[in-house]
Amino acid sequence: MTAPIADRHPLPRSYWQLAGAAGVNAVGEGAFAAAVPLLAATLTGDARLISAVAAATSLPWLLLSLPVGALVDRHDRAGLMWRAQAAQAVLVAAVAVLAGTGRISMATLALLAFGLGTCQIVVGTAAQALLPDLVAGPHLHRANGYHQTIVIVGRQFAGPPAGSLLFAAAAALPFGVDAAALTVSAVLLATLPRTRDQTSAAPAAAPPLKLRTAIADGLRWLAGHRLLRLLAVLLAVNTFCFHLATATLVLLVTHTLDLDARSYGLLLAAAAVGSVIGGLVSARLIAVLGVRGAILGALGTNVVAFAGIGLSPDPLTLGALLGVAGFATTLWSVVTVTLRQQLVPSHLLGRVTGVYRMVGLGLTPLGALTGGLVAHSLGLRAPYLIAAAIRAVALLVAAPLLIRALRRLS
């Protein structure tokens, strides 16, 4: 399957409004993402407990992706997004108050992280289903690439250094910034034009489906599509390995390499440099390599990058390899999200996305917990090395199947 040549057709105003909201939110999320492990590290030095907080954030992907996907197909997608962001603002504000008063505990932090993860399922699933309603199919690679770039700049480049610097000044500050950013994002999303009920895009005269039936339709559709089913399984392996490796990255940086909180934020920003480049050039790269070359290249690059991170002797090497991994991950995300948006009918996109992300992201909490156990037992470098080995085996097994499935779409 080949990709269309990247164009310069103007993207609609509603797309930029959606992307702007995502960018504002991403800055706050980046500050939050840097501050949470730093806050957890002040409460405990146990890698298992720190990884448990990461697991709590991602556990909703396993538990709630299916019903959320069905709801996204039933209701106004932008409306769901702004309400979820408003709820997130309240939860993050609670973290700020508790951290500022010294009343936060690991259990409370994990509980609040679970609530934030639940809201993020709604936002993420609805956003991916909404974007094809705003942007025509031939322009989706570029739209997804720009969207990824905007999010990455905020979440990984601008947010983390700000979060670590603010945390060094006062524990509550990065969480207050995130709460404010979430509020602004919710306001921007609330002003998007209302989309029609997605059930109206279903075949004419079809009665509203029960939630269980709607979920089953999404499950059957994905199970019957060879390529997307395989990509969902590969995403599951990728996310398991990513969180296995990164759940204790803060300890690798602060304990093994003996760096401070500010340096941790800068390393996260270094990873974002590669991600930003990936988002900006992904459409052109896919046009040159084709979908198959882009997917296989991204998977292979991440194997090498993860192995190198586990063996990094100094912060400069670690930062450079984190950037390479970020580039490959963004390329994978752009090409696979676009494929799903192009192949799945609009009235099923929320449900299929929910199923796809449940399969692909459901192992995230297990990966984080496994990473904590591996780091505790085998050392802080071991998670990256083991993750690289697992990804290498998965690539060798899946590559022939992936090539055959993509040829059928050509």
Image (spheres, rainbow, N blue to C red):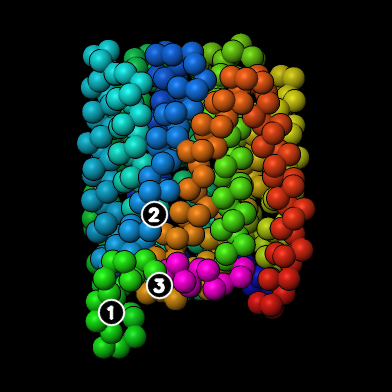
Q: Where residue 320 sits: x, y (%)?
A: 69, 32
Tell me if residue 225 is in the magenta stretch: yes
At a point 35% along the width and 29% down the height, the residue shown is: 110
Closer to the chain start, of discs 3 and 2, is 2
Q: Where residue 80 sits: x, y (%)?
A: 26, 57
| Figure check: 162 above or below 80 | above
Say what amino acid the circle numbered 1 marks: Ser
Packing grade of label 2 (10 A; few <14, some 14-19, many >=20) is: many
Name the residue that disc number 2 marks. Answer: 65
Question: Which of the 4 quarters of the picture holds residue 289?
Answer: bottom right
Closer to the chain start, of discs 1 and 2, is 2
Q: Could you tell me which secondary element the residue under label 3 belongs to? A: helix
**Contact, CB < 8 Å: mark 1 with mark 2?**
no
Location of the C terminus (image quadrant): bottom right
Visible in this render: residue 55?
yes
**Contact, CB < 8 Å: mark 3 with mark 2?**
no
Tell me if residue 90 is in the magenta stretch: no
From the viewer's perspective, is 334 left or right of 165?
Answer: right
Q: In terms of secondary structure, what is the magenta stretch mainly?
A: helix
Q: Where residue 221 sits: x, y (%)?
A: 48, 72
Q: CA distance from mark 1 to mark 3?
A: 16 Å
Packing grade of label 1 (10 A; few <14, some 14-19, many >=20) is: some
Q: Which residues are the magenta region?
A: 218-227
Say what amino acid the circle numbered 2 marks: Ser
Name the residue that disc number 3 marks. Answer: 217
Q: CA distance from mark 3 to mark 2?
A: 14 Å
Q: CA distance from mark 1 to mark 2?
A: 22 Å
Q: Where residue 109 sits: x, y (%)?
A: 33, 26
From the viewer's perspective, is 405 left or right of 236?
Answer: right
Question: Which of the 4 quarters of the picture holds residue 34?
Answer: top left
Say what amino acid the circle numbered 3 marks: Asp
